[in-house]
Amino acid sequence: MARIGDDSLIVRGEQRADGTWLFTIRYTVHFEPGELGTRFADSVQVSADSRATSVPFLACGRSVLRKKRVVVDDRTLTDEAYATVCVRRRGGADALTQSARLRRISTQSPGTRPRGPGVVSSDGRLSGGARSGPS
């Protein structure tokens, strides 16, 4: 039987300019060898009125990474909100479900985002990296 990977459900939210939140939900579905080539469908629910439509997909490998995006009005959420993923075989009654707490990340202007290795600075060089050539 297909299963959603342990600790594979990741939910992130970013506030958009209009005050709504864009949540990105990622998870991995693992399949048994006999399920390869079988059609499945998945959906995500963030709140009572914020449900993503069910999307069909094919079990094309032993594990398939799935990603969903859902826009939610912030006034409908509490700090205890969860996203729930539902995966089911097309035409089947059994469903796999898994929930994860929503992590909200407020937007920041580019000038206030922290820099680290591999982040391009304003002069076009990597911050924190060594420069080559004469100084």
Image (cartoon, rainbow, N blue to C red):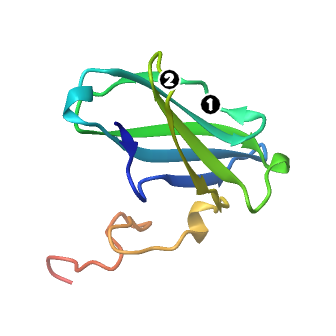
Q: Secondary structure at mark 1?
A: loop
| Residue placed furthest toward the left | 133
Q: Which label number is shown at residue 55? A: 2
Q: Position of residue 6 (x, y in %)?
A: 40, 56
Check residue 52 in the rendering and tell me which mark sits there, or answer none.
1
Which quadrant is the N terminus positioned in?
top left
Up-down relation of residue 66 to residue 110 (above or below): above
**Residue 85 % position (x, y):** 55, 41
Mark pair 2, 1: CA separation: 9 Å
Q: Quadrant of the C terminus?
A: bottom left
In the rendered image of this protein, does residue 86 appear above or below residue 59? below
Q: Amino acid at mark 2?
A: Val
Q: Quadrant of residue 45?
A: top right
Indicate the amino acid at tag 1: Ala
Residue 16 position, x and y percent, is 69, 47
Is 89 in front, or is 76?
89
Query: Mark 2 Cα within 10 Å, few/some/many (few <14, many 20+)?
Result: few
